[in-house]
Amino acid sequence: MIANRVNVAGVEVDNLSETEAVAVVAALVEAGGPHYLCVINAAKAVAASRDARLRAVLKRAALVTADGMSVVWAARWLGKPLKERVTGIDLFARLVQEAARRGWSVFFFGAEDESVRGVVERFRREHATLRVAGWRNGYFKPSESAAIAEAIRRSGADVLFVAMGSPAQEYWIAEHMELTGARFAMGVGGSFDHLSGRKPRAPRWMQRTGLEWLHRLLREPRRLWRRYLLGNAQFIRLVVGQRRHRGGA
Ligand code: UDP
């Protein structure tokens, strides 16, 4: 929503609470598509600073929310505080609930078979009225993308969640969303793994204090240390540069 955006490290972030974001998405779905939402964290902001394609995808997003605590801290330090952190995984769960309430049909696309099946089963258990248009895993050849988009269209999905990690999911959505016929799409990263119970989520206290990244880092240090430590250093550099450019806040 153009009206109230905060620029953090070159990315325009919507200043919305989670509840407000759910209401905006509901209005977008009811108005008809295609619209998509992106969540932003430090790593994605750094990637966008180097990748024109990702920048273009973020620019076209109907909504961009602050998934990472470092984005919330940066906005505050820049003198334009965001109302709150709106994580992808929590927003995803809220939107599925909203879909069940409003009768939107939902397609779940991404992750391994067991995760996507698990997440569908879980949401069906939690929301008796949920209309599941379909699901499929996130492992395929690039040449299959058009056929997958067509299958989503045939499913009649109103809303599409794509769990393939960044930036693959953002690229896929921006490129194929129109073909899918969905009104709204969103990339949800590893959410199917966590919500299906295949990978544990951080304990509540860590979620509340913005330490989920530490939980992930401790579980998969080899895979993630570069992303987190170097990524955050680069993110800080971008934000410091931004504040200096403005002449300080
Ligand atoms: N994934 C996929 N297709 C691929 C590669 C990855 O569907 O070709 C899935 C993977 O199974 C996992 C998710 O994408 O469920 C990526 O999770 P990760 O936590 O790495 O994403 P992030 O939230 O960090 O962007």
Image (cartoon, rainbow, N blue to C red):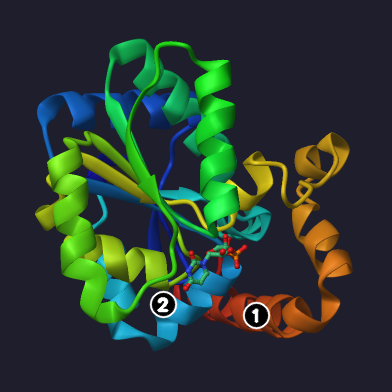
**Label disc, if present, on residue 231 of the rendered structure:** 1
Tell me: is circle 2 under 8 Å from ligand 1: no
Q: In this view, does 97 lie above or below 203?
A: above
Counting from the top left corner in percent of width and height, residue 162 is at 40, 53
The amino acid pointed to by label 2 is Ala
Q: Which residue is drawn at 82% across and 68% down?
A: 217
Which comes sooner in the sequence, label 1 or label 2? 2
Instruction: Quadrant for residue 30, please give it.
Output: top left
Q: Is residue 35 above or below residue 104?
A: below
Does any portion of residue 208 appear in the rendered image? Answer: yes
**Label disc, if present, on residue 71 of the rendered structure:** none
Counting from the top left corner in percent of width and height, residue 185 is at 30, 46
118 sits left or right of 159 in the view: right
Counting from the top left corner in percent of width and height, residue 100 is at 39, 17
Front-lying residue, 140 or 183 = 140
Q: Which residue is drawn at 48% across and 51% down?
A: 188
**Distance from label 1 to label 2 (Cα)?**
12 Å
Quadrant (top left, top right, bottom left, bottom right) of the N terminus: top left
The amino acid pointed to by label 1 is Gly
Instruction: Quadrant for residue 130, please give it.
Output: top left
Counting from the top left corner in percent of width and height, residue 5 is at 36, 48
Front-lying residue, 20 or 27 = 27
List the residue tagged with mark 2: 48
At mark 2, the secondary structure is helix
Indicate which quadrant contains ligand 1: bottom right
Quadrant (top left, top right, bottom left, bottom right) of the C terminus: bottom right
